């Protein structure tokens, strides 16, 4: 057992066991079995058909439909990166087995009005399609569980089956947690329900592990129960799982079976119109995040850690590749930094995702090409980004002309700026000539200020030195 998994208690070492149940809302415009719309933040009960409300006369009604007994997929696994030591860039790959993925309906939501002492029901979510993914208890700390959720989120976003937005409840995590002493069987588990951020997944699990160890070490017992995470980061009991007796599962008579087949069974007797060919879907799948990370390192020679950063920001890796193809001279290192630092900064400041960016790739490519050729400085490139992100519709070259952003590259013109500075600052020139060469930096500062930072510093410095040298000899 790796040392990283061992937790210290007053009575010795402890191990923790974690399994996750994740509800991911299926990215669909309508509910699973009705035509009602699915929308986040709609006013209460605006997206409810008679069927969703289970009014008499609508079939089937009044209970949750789930594929629990015959899940759409089972016995899978997910490999993902865990960064045990944040300072070490190289992650460890960890494998978690996935017991099953099943489709089911989401439920309505009750809203408690403390003041009026009443409970109201919002059925907007009733009947929305969810995929529930159940893992085996293959994780041993909060960090691993959080990394699992993050990778799953990236995959679901990529394949477009769930938008992954935890804050909007589109991805919700229930964490099952137990602790035991090394060499002993798994302990009794508790389940922390409805965790809605990756960070909370880690924190809630760490809190719950510590709590269980404390309970056991002080002579108590852990009871099997569901708990929720409160505002202070503590887990508190919700309802006793043992009280939830019998769900009374029964086959739903109104639903025809969902038949899956693959290329090898294509000629069998299955009615192909009603069945789903898994291999066809597989062929339509986009490149998965980890495949893309590996390919980016091979195709562009970038570091794995940069590939991770590009891929984990939805849409950024694709943008990087488009810009790489568009720019003739592939200065990938500079381009990576431009994507990861400059472009991301503009997006984050405006609360935008890469996909929501208002700037067409061609314009970004124009800016980067100008930066690469030395036509504009990094500062001007940043200014161009800012203008375009704020809705400027002019072409890049028009903005460069009108806003005077092009670098001054003609030596003659640079000399003019230098001469002007030297004429205006005879005292600095005198200090430079007689005792301190460092004051050249002050003169350079003046040149940059007057030229609005449009002269490449090396060029400006060389010309200034030559000018001062000539003056001395005069
Ligand atoms: P049940 O059928 O009783 O609901 P499952 O075997 O389906 O239980 O497990 C439900 C969830 O609890 C799964 O995510 C699983 O990984 C997790 N789990 C099972 N045993 C433990 C344990 N001892 N500690 C932590 N998690 C566990």
Image (cartoon, rainbow, N blue to C red):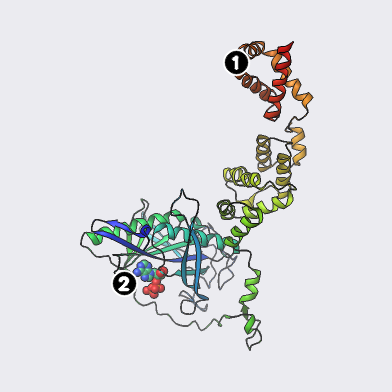
Q: Quadrant of residue 440?
A: top right
Q: Residue at x 49, y 79 (%)?
A: 70
* Residue occupied by mark 1: 436
Which one is in front, 403 or 17?
Answer: 17
Camera sees residue 329:
yes
Is the residue marked 1 within 8 Å of ligand 1, measured from its CB? no
Pointer 2 residue = 243
Q: Quadrant of ligand 1?
A: bottom left
- Note whether 213 is above or below 408 in the view shown: below
- Quarter of the picture containing the C terminus is top right
Image coords of residue 466 (percent x, y): 72, 20
Instruction: Determine whether the beta carbon of the residue marked 2 sits less than 8 angstroms from the nearest atom of ligand 1.
Output: no
Residue extending furthest left?
A: 219
Residue at image point 33% right, 62% down? 15
Question: The N terminus appears in which quarter of the rendering?
Answer: bottom left
Badge 1 or badge 2: first in the primary sequence: 2
Mark 1: few/some/many CA within 10 Å (<14, 14-19, 20+): few
Q: Tell me the crowding category of disc 2: few under 14, some 14 to 19, or many 20 or more residues within 10 angstroms, Cα based.
A: few
Say above or below: 367 vs 240: above
Query: What residue appears at the point 61 percent right and 76 percent down from the top-left corner?
Result: 278
x and y percentages locating residue 217 in the rendered image: 23, 60
- The residue positioned 71% from the left and 50% from the top of the image is 361
Label 1 vs label 2, nearer the camera: 1
Residue 206 position within the rendered picture, expressed as x and y whole percent measured from the top left: 36, 56
In the rendered structure, the answer to whether residue 162 lies left or right of residue 395 reads left
The residues bearing labels 1 and 2 have C-alpha atoms spaced at a distance of: 85 Å
């Amino acid at each position: 057992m790796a040392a990283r998994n061992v937790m210290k208690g007053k009575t010795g070492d402890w191990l923790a066991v974690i399994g996750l149940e994740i509800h991911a809302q299926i990215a669909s415009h309508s509910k699973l079995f009705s035509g009602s719309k699915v929308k986040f933040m709609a006013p209460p009960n605006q997206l409810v058909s008679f069927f969703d409300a289970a009014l008499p006369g609508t079939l089937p009604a009044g209970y949750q439909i789930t594929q629990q007994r015959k899940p759409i997929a089972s016995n899978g696994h997910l490999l993902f990166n865990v960064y045990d030591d944040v300072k070490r860039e190289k992650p460890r790959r960890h494998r978690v087995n996935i017991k099953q993925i099943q489709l089911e309906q989401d439920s309505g939501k009750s809203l408690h009005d403390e003041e009026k002492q009443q409970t109201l029901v919002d059925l907007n979510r009733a009947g929305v399609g969810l995929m529930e993914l159940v893992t085996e208890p293959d994780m041993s700390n909060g960090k691993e569980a959080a990394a699992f959720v993050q990778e799953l989120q990236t995959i679901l976003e990529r394949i477009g089956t769930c938008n992954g937005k935890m804050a909007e409840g589109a991805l919700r995590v229930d964490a099952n947690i137990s602790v035991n002493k090394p060499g002993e069987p798994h302990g009794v588990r508790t389940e922390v329900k409805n965790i809605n951020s990756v960070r909370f997944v880690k924190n809630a699990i760490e809190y719950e592990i510590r709590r269980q160890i404390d309970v056991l070490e002080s002579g108590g017992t852990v009871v099997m129960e569901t708990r929720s995470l409160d505002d202070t980061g503590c887990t508190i009991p919700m309802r006793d799982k043992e009280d939830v007796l019998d769900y009374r599962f029964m086959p739903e008579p109104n639903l025809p079976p969902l038949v899956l087949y693959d290329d090898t069974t294509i000629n069998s007797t299955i009615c192909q119109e009603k069945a789903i060919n898994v291999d066809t879907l597989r062929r339509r799948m986009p490149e998965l995040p980890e495949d893309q990370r590996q390919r980016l390192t091979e195709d562009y020679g970038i570091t794995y850690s940069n590939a991770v950063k590009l891929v984990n920001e939805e849409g950024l890796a694709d943008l990087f590749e488009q810009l790489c193809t568009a720019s003739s001279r592939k200065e990938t290192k500079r381009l990576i930094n431009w994507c990861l630092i400059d472009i991301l900064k503009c997006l984050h400041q405006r609360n935008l995702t890469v996909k929501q960016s208002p700037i067409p790739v061609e314009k970004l490519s124009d800016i980067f090409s100008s930066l690469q050729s030395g036509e504009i400085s990094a500062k001007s490139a940043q200014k161009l980004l800012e203008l375009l992100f704020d809705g400027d519709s002019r072409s890049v070259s028009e903005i460069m002309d009108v806003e005077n952003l092009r670098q001054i590259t003609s030596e003659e013109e640079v000399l003019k700026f230098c001469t002007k500075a030297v004429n205006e600052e005879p005292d600095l020139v005198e200090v430079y000539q007689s005792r301190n060469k460092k004051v050249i930096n002050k003169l350079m500062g003046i040149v940059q200020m007057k030229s609005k930072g449009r002269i490449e510093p090396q060029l400006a410095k060389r010309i200034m030195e030559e000018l001062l040298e000539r003056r001395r000899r005069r």
